[in-house]
Image (spheres, rainbow, N blue to C red):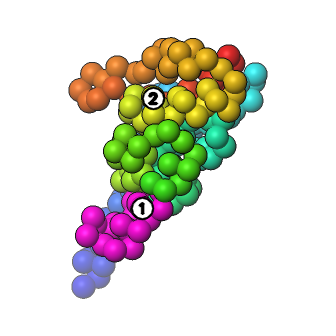
């Protein structure tokens, strides 16, 4: 019995060193070698951090492009989807409300022209991207609010499209809004 207890104590000590010391240090070193040194890829404007490249932010002002809705209100500490299916009446009402709100803020747009991503949350609730169609559908509103030519705003969207290698083309909403402010 004494022999088994000593062996189990030694094994416990070895596993504590491996799992609670060496493994976290190894992961921290890998994080330091990544872009942003493990703190995320920040976006800075005039020396101030204004957001993260891979985390969506909430834009609700009509003078900015809006991103996808978030089931967690863009709280990066609580990333999650809504987990409600398309047959759930509560979820359907939320989507209808989002459609109505989008139409109010984007006059002249028909319900059928709204890309699905503009009224449905992503799986993580933190998606920083929208499709080019999601950006183009907002051009008229932004041009009107800012007093800009629609073609100029559309050209700005064209410049911000990130070509997808294995997936679809996307537009980073934060970067697009920063470029919009710089016009």
User: Which residue of the protein is positioned furthest toward the bottom in this rendering?
Assistant: 1
**Where residue 46 appears, x then y in whole percent?**
76, 22
Picture quarter containing residue 65?
Answer: top right
Residue that appears at 41% across and 43% down = 110
Q: Are marks 2 and 1 in contact (CB under 8 Å)?
A: no
Q: Nearer the viewer, residue 2 or 116?
A: 116
**Where residue 146 appears, x then y in whole percent?**
69, 28
Q: Say whether residue 134 is visible.
A: yes
* Number of the label disc, if any, that sits on residue 23: none
* Gap in angstroms between the C-alphas marked 2 and 1: 21 Å
Residue that appears at 46% across and 40% down = 109
Q: Is 51 located above or below residue 151 in the figure?
A: below
Is 46 colored magenta in this rendering? no
Q: Identify the secondary structure beneath mark 2.
A: helix
Q: Which residue is mark 2?
A: 136
Q: Which residue is mark 1?
A: 96
Q: Nearer the viewer, residue 17 or 29?
A: 29
Q: Say whether residue 9 is visible.
A: no
**Where residue 34 appears, x then y in whole percent?**
47, 29
In the rendered image, which quarter contains the N terminus? bottom left
Q: Identify the secondary structure beneath mark 1.
A: helix
Residue that appears at 40% across and 21% down = 162
- The residue segment tinted magenta is 76-98
Q: Nearer the viewer, residue 55 or 135?
A: 135
In the rendered image, which quarter contains the C terminus? top right
Residue 141 is left or right of residue 1, and the answer is right
Picture quarter containing residue 8?
Answer: bottom left
Q: Nearer the viewer, residue 55 or 134?
A: 134
Is 90 colored magenta in this rendering? yes
**How many residues crowd mark 2 within 10 Å: few (<14), some (14–19), many (20+)?**
some
Residue that appears at 40% across and 28% down = 132
């Amino acid at each position: 019995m004494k022999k088994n207890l000593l062996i189990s104590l030694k094994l416990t000590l070895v596993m504590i060193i491996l799992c609670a010391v060496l493994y976290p240090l190894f992961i921290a070193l890998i994080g330091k070698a990544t872009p942003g040194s493990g703190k995320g890829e920040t976006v800075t404007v005039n020396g101030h951090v204004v957001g993260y490249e891979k985390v969506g932010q909430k834009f609700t002002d009509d003078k900015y492009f809006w991103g996808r809705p978030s089931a967690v209100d863009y709280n990066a500490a609580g990333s999650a989807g809504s987990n409600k299916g398309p047959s759930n009446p509560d979820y359907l009402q939320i989507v209808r409300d989002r459609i109505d709100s989008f139409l109010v803020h984007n006059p002249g747009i028909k319900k059928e022209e709204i890309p699905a991503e503009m009224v449905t949350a992503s799986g993580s609730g933190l998606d920083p991207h929208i499709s080019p169609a999601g950006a183009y559908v907002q051009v008229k509103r932004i041009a009107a609010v800012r007093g800009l030519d629609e073609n100029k705003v559309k050209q700005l969207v064209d410049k911000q499209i990130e070509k997808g290698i294995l997936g679809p083309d996307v537009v980073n909403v934060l970067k697009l809004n920063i470029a919009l402010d710089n016009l």
